[in-house]
């Protein structure tokens, strides 16, 4: 399938060269896209927030690999570290891989009911598939998948994953995104940053769920919906976006705000970014923020507002407090976290080392470094 050969990595201007199949091909693709605009309404969060007894979040893809760090038990939290096969003379000769990217697996329990949700897909399918196998995570058990936002370090592994494991997934598996904006073509300062492959999602027989409002995921979780700008934070803009369809990739202009349809690349407002959240019984919210481009404080406050729950137990993911943001910005973020008073901050992926250092100095060991393969279990231990 040409879309998979192209694999979304070509810049808009280069797609014709890399994915060329002639005008007929392009017309056919666009027609297929138009025919394939099927979505299903997400179940909107209204009132009652689902409550789980126990939640285990596993970092499947993350930026760093660590070794020789002991497991830990804390109040309401177990941290399990894992590295893969450390005996190279014995098969399989595989070990967990790190890369620039993020993928998380959330396993939740409410009474006898278990739910499994995959959140993001990292940068490459090779790392994602390698790590899923080592961690014994079976895609056949997935009840939903969520893509936090349209950046390649979060969806880059998706097409290869669907090619390898799509047939094992449950039929019509829900695939949540925060809105049409997620599909737009994007550039980062280095050039092309790819676009999400809508056709691959539909060809895999997933059910595309547009969740611009807070939505219930797999009966146990909820998404934030559109993340408001309620703190000092403004959208961080390392990328630009283009509204329109180019060679079959992109976002439909008629589904986008007219003012964004300028015919050129514009600063990315991450209007579609979402976080996935759980309410753990007697503990509070666990917020899985993937990259926090609309601000990590804004993201947490959105989860609180959407649920009506003020107690935050943990925040996990990429906080994106990175250069050129300096110490003043970092300290403001830490002050806001002191105000919110979560029990745990688990920093992963794009959080930034300087934030980790200053937050750890200020907030103590509630700030925990993540790594590939680490599993965080919340609730009764
Ligand atoms: Fe990221």
Image: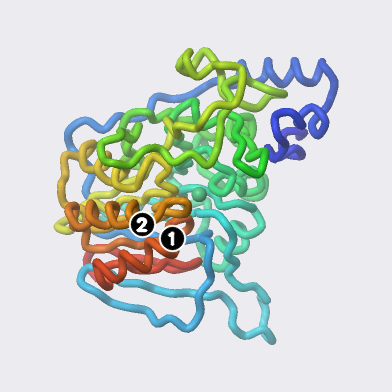
Closer-to-camera residue (290/374): 290
Q: Please give the residue where the numbered disc 1 appears in the rendered image.
A: 348
Residue appearing at x 50%, y 32% in the figure: 268
Residue at mark 1: C-beta within 8 A of ligand 1:
no
Measured from the top left, where is residue 209 in percent x and y? 44, 30
Q: Please give the residue where the numbered disc 2 appears in the rendered image.
A: 316
Q: Are marks 2 and 1 in contact (CB under 8 Å)?
A: yes
Q: Is residue 220 in view from this perspective? A: no
Establish if 276 lies above or below 242: below
Q: Which mark is residue 296?
A: none
Measured from the top left, where is residue 281 in percent x and y? 18, 55
Which element type, helix, strand or loop, lies under badge 1? loop
Instruction: Work out which quarter of the rendered image holds the N terminus and state it.
Output: top right
Q: Is residue 2 in view from this perspective? A: yes
Residue appearing at x 69%, y 86% in the figure: 89
Crowding near the residue tagged with mark 2, few <14, some 14–19, many ≥20 C-alpha atoms within 10 Å = many
């Amino acid at each position: 399938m040409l879309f998979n050969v192209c694999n979304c990595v070509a810049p808009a201007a280069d797609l014709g060269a890399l994915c060329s199949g002639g005008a007929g091909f392009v017309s056919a693709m666009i027609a297929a896209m138009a025919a394939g605009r099927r979505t299903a309404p997400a179940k909107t969060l209204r009132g009652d927030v689902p409550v789980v007894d126990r939640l285990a979040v596993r970092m499947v893809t993350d930026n760093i690999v660590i070794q020789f760090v002991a497991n830990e038990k804390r109040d309401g939290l177990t941290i399990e570290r894992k590295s893969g096969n450390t005996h190279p003379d014995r098969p399989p000769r595989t070990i967990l891989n790190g890369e620039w990217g993020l993928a998380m697996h959330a396993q939740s329990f409410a009474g006898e009911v278990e739910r499994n949700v995959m959140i993001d897909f990292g940068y490459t399918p090779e790392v994602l598939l390698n790590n899923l196998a080592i961690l014994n995570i079976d895609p056949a058990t997935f009840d939903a998948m969520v893509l936090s936002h349209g950046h390649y370090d979060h969806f880059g592994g998706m097409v290869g994953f669907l090619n390898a494991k799509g047939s094992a997934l449950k039929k019509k598996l829900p695939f949540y995104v925060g809105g049409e904006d997620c599909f737009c073509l994007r550039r980062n300062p280095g050039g092309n940053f790819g676009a999400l492959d809508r056709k691959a999602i539909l060809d895999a027989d997933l059910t595309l769920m547009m969740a611009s409002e807070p939505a219930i995921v797999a009966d146990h979780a909820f998404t934030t919906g559109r993340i408001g700008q309620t703190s000092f934070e403004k959208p961080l803009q390392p990328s630009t976006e283009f509204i329109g369809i180019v060679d079959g990739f992109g976002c439909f202009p008629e589904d986008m705000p007219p003012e964004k349809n300028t015919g050129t690349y514009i600063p990315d407002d991450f209007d579609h970014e979402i976080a996935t959240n759980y309410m753990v019984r007697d503990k509070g919210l666990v917020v899985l923020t993937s990259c926090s481009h609309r601000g990590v404080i804004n993201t947490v406050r959105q989860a609180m507002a959407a649920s009506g729950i003020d107690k935050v137990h943990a925040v996990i993911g990429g906080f994106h407090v990175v250069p050129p943001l300096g110490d003043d910005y970092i300290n403001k973020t830490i002050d806001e976290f002191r105000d919110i008073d979560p029990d745990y901050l688990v920093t992963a992926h794009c959080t930034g080392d300087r934030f980790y250092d200053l937050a750890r100095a200020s907030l103590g060991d509630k700030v925990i470094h993540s790594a590939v393969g680490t599993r965080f279990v919340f609730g009764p231990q």
